């Protein structure tokens, strides 16, 4: 590593200008002893949106992130190993029947969170999924009306200028996407051919990268390194959309600031945050705390924040914190094409079929979306090592076919299961904080989804002309861990993201998702956070930020 | 052992070094990778012998005059405690997993062949690793080390990540390499931009065509 992780940057009244190589923007700054309106933990999909929404509503906001504040133009190399600096790489213990890969697979650590290296696929939930239990008979219902979520999707799609088709083939009619679709690359057209041969629909995938210039951000140049950070700013991550908005509206962002514990008083209300920054422990006072550290760090922080009125961890009276952790089934099928595909050109997933999300005649619950693929070399090579045990000349020969490969991969729904969970282990990390243990195992329905999808994708690929097919299995994304629901008995937070047992504690990240759906989660996390932001504003206007006893 | 693949003879991804396809930070990072091969800091000399032989078995490079350095970067990752973020519950911490893993491979070689791992010929090393991957092991060192999990997800994973992050490996597989700020315009099959190397078509393609 040469550059690695920069030092603290957002300090002394200024923050990095993410559209420049070395510039700054002014930033409002607060003292630790100042009672700010909101202290937000995490600045990713959930926390970044919330920082902007609350600052724009006129609240004083300090947003903390354990990760650094990058300027993509100067800091992001076109090199996979260097870019490991974007991930949460502290060791976390992965346990259970089907232990999941962490780190680069699902956890970012930077201002902007995991969206800094996400693949930009921007799909909405199917409306019925918000009533999965009552309308479709599985999982849980969301305590939120789907139309409210759809209005929030409109808002965040516009904020990210999602590029997508004029008419999206699945779900209720919706307006056109803010920006026109990208040209579908060769890898995406393999999916299209397979879908057409099998008689299912497909579409250019709606993605969060610009198809036309926007302010100081240029359109996508199809370099294909999106998953290790976009060095041109075409990618619309939280880092270059909601964070600049939050700063402009008066929010303070503290980079390289790891929050260790939420302090609560005898009545059980949150009073501030203990955090580590610049080599020392500090304490920020606040009237409200919003937690958005994603599905492992959010439960970890709450479990590590026991107080006089929260003996078993904050908001954990019912023992629900950390439970119902979900992932997505991320199984794939790969094959060799006669054509030279060069799947590294363009964003990795430029075509999608949501057929099996909207088709209910099938023998499993939930659904899955299939996307075209374009993994970078080490990513593809390690998946062959992990799945096939390929090594030696065999691996080198397989990799020699890289430019002729095509692949299809799913994002498949995993059922919420209370036994899949985050707990604290006996070990501690470098800051002395308990290391989290993640326990995960697939259920029968989850396996059925993987089987069905691998069979269907094999047919698609064969129909598209691929030979020498092979399958890989894996997981992607994290959801759940602090579900939102209808009562203190079934959930950690209510529909407003407010903890049932602590009225000035809010959660607005992927951990509150009661179900995972068959699509990538970030758009739903952002929409839900925007929605919660509106609710907080409305509650404040009515003088109800403190819940009536 | 089969021959090394050479689908793109004559292609050198570094030829784009001074073009708009490479930005300053990428040049800096790749130059560092090429010029500054780290010294051994973490592993003991005996461990190093096993490590070097392991790297050479996971990714043999008999075709290269100057092989891509692998062991030095594994050692550097250990010295810097550069973890991946996943500690499989069945395994110890990263550094310990490597130390004990190398010892177990060496012990397995002694148990099966009566010689240390690095002293074995290439095909014996390869079949030993296959057996380890199949969990067909004898040495007591494996008692609480799951062989496949350790081999695939820790040892081979890291070595392969180092190999395919090297420009020589990019050239080998015909990967376009760094592409910022200039990316690509032509995205359809069998098309390439003027600034993409005019690669010789892979052999298999022309063979198939006839
Ligand atoms: C490789 C990859 C590809 C992906 N591709 C897609 C995609 O194409 N489409 C899609 O919709 N989704 C995708 N995702 C998933 C998406 O990025 C995440 O679901 C989403 O970002 C999660 O949002 P979040 O706010 O819950 O957490 P994050 O975005 O991860 O943000 C959490 C932030 O909190 C910080 N934090 C955590 N704990 C603390 C603490 N105690 N103190 C201070 N800071 C803390 C972290 O540093 C981090 O920055 C992808 C993810 C990965 C890893
Ligand atoms: S393909 Fe587009 S979004 Fe992806 S890294 Fe390149 S410029 Fe950024």
Image (cartoon, rainbow, N blue to C red):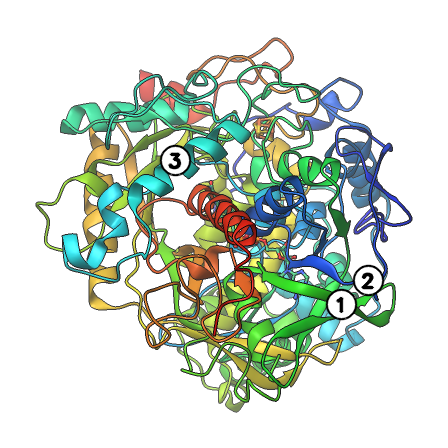
Residue closest to the eye, A206 or B130? A206
Say which chain tag 1 marks.
Answer: A
Mark 1 or mark 2, which is nearer the start of the sequence? 2
Q: Which mark is residue A151?
A: 3
Q: Residue at x 77, y 37 (%)?
A: A71
Tag 1–tag 3 contact (CB < 8 Å): no
Residue closest to the eye, A369 or A270? A270
Which element is circle 1 on? Answer: strand
Residue closest to the eye, B117 or A56? A56
Q: Residue at x 62, y 46 (%)?
A: A54
Q: Residue A360's x, y, as percent? A: 12, 45
Mark 1 is surrounded, within 10 Å at the Cα level, by few (under 14), some (14 to 19) or many (20 or more) other residues, namely many
Q: Residue at x 20, y 29 (%)?
A: A463
Q: Which mark is residue A34?
A: 2
- Mark 2–mark 1 Cα distance, whole angstroms, equals 6 Å
Q: Residue A137's x, y, as percent? A: 14, 59
Mark 3 is surrounded, within 10 Å at the Cα level, by few (under 14), some (14 to 19) or many (20 or more) other residues, namely few
Mark 2 is surrounded, within 10 Å at the Cα level, by few (under 14), some (14 to 19) or many (20 or more) other residues, namely few
Taking A262 as reference, is A127 above or below it? above
Mark 3 or mark 1, which is nearer the start of the sequence? 3
Q: Which mark is residue A285?
A: 1
Q: Do badges 1 and 3 share one subunit? A: yes
**Number of dots carrying numbers:** 3
Q: Is residue A389 visible?
A: no
Tag 2–tag 1 contact (CB < 8 Å): yes
Of all residues, the one furthest to the right in this rendering is: A12
Q: Which mark is residue A154?
A: none
- Mark 1–mark 3 Cα distance, whole angstroms, equals 34 Å
């Amino acid at each position: 590593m040469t550059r690695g992780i920069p030092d603290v940057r957002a300090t002394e009244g200024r923050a990095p200008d993410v559209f420049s190589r070395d510039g700054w923007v002014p930033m409002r700054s607060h003292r630790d002893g100042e009672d700010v309106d909101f202290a937000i933990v995490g600045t990713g999909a959930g926390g970044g949106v919330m920082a902007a929404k609350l600052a724009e509503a006129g609240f004083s906001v300090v947003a903390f992130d354990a990760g650094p504040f990058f300027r993509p133009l100067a800091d992001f190399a076109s090199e996979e190993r260097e870019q490991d600096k974007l991930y949460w790489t502290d060791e976390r213990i992965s346990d259970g029947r089907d232990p999941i890969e962490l780190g680069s697979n699902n956890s970012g650590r930077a201002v902007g969170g995991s969206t800094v290296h996400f693949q930009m696929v921007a799909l909405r939930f199917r409306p019925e999924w918000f009533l999965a239990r009552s309308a479709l008979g599985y999982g849980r219902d969301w305590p939120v009306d789907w139309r409210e979520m759809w209005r929030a999707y409109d808002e965040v799609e516009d904020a990210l200028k999602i590029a997508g088709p004029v008419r999206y083939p699945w779900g209720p009619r919706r307006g056109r996407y803010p920006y026109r679709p990208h040209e579908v690359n060769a890898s995406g057209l393999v999916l299209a051919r397979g879908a057409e041969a099998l008689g299912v629909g497909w579409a250019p995938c709606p993605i969060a990268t610009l198809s036309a210039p926007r302010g100081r951000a240029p359109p996508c140049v199809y370099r294909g390194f999106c998953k290790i950070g976009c060095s041109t700013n075409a990618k619309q991550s939280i880092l270059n959309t909601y964070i600049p908005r939050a700063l402009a509206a008066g929010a303070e962002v503290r980079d390289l600031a790891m929050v260790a514990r939420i302090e609560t008083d005898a009545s059980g209300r949150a009073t501030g945050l203990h955090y580590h920054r610049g080599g020392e422990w500090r304490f920020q006072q606040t009237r409200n705390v919003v937690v958005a550290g994603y599905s492992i760090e959010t439960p970890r922080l709450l479990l590590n924040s026991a107080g006089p009125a929260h003996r078993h961890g904050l908001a954990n009276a019912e023992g629900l914190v950390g439970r119902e952790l979900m992932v997505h089934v991320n199984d794939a099928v790969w094959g060799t094409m006669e054509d030279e595909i060069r799947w590294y050109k363009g964003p990795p997933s430029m075509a999608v079929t949501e057929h099996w999300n909207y088709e209910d005649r099938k023998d499993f619950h939930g659904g899955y979306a299939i996307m075209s693929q374009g993994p970078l070399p080490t990513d593809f090579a390690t998946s062959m090592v992990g799945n096939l045990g390929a090594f030696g000349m065999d691996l080198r020969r397989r990799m020699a076919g890289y430019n002729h490969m095509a692949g299809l991969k799913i994002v498949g729904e995993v059922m919420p299961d209370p036994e899949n969970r985050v707990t604290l282990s006996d070990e501690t990390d470098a800051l002395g904080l308990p290391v989290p243990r993640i326990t995960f195992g697939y259920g029968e329905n989850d396996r059925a989804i993987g089987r069905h999808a691998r069979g269907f994708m094999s047919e698609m690929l064969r129909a598209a002309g691929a030979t020498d097919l092979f399958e890989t299995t894996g997981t992607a994304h994290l959801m759940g861990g602090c579900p939102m629901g209808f009562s203190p008995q079934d959930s950690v937070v209510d529909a407003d993201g407010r903890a049932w047992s602590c009225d000035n504690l809010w959660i607005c990240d992927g951990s509150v998702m009661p179900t995972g759906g068959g699509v990538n989660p970030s758009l739903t996390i952002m929409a839900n956070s925007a929605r919660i932001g509106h609710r907080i504003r409305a509650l404040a206007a009515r003088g109800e930020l403190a819940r009536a006893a | 052992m089969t021959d090394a693949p050479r689908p793109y003879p004559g292609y050198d991804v570094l030829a784009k070094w001074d073009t708009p396809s490479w930005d300053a930070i990428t040049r800096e990072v790749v130059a560092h990778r090429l010029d500054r091969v780290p010294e051994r800091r973490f592993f003991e000399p005996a461990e190093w012998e096993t490590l070097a032989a392991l790297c050479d078995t996971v990714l043999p490079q008999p075709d290269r005059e100057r092989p891509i350095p692998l062991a030095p970067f594994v050692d550097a990752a250990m010295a810097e405690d550069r973890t991946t973020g996943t500690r499989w519950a069945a395994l110890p911490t990263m550094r310990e997993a490597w130390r004990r893993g190398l010892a177990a491979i060496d012990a397995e070689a002694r148990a099966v062949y009566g010689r240390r791992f690095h002293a074995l010929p290439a095909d014996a090393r390869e079949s030993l690793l296959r057996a380890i991957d199949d969990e067909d092991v004898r040495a007591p060192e494996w008692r609480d080390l799951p062989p496949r999990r350790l081999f695939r997800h820790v040892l081979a994973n890291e070595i392969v990540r180092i190999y395919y992050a090297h420009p020589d490996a990019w050239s080998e597989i015909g990967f376009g390499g760094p592409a910022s700020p200039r990316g690509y315009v032509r995205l359809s099959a069998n098309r390439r931009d003027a600034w993409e190397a005019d690669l010789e078509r892979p052999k298999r393609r022309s063979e198939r065509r006839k």
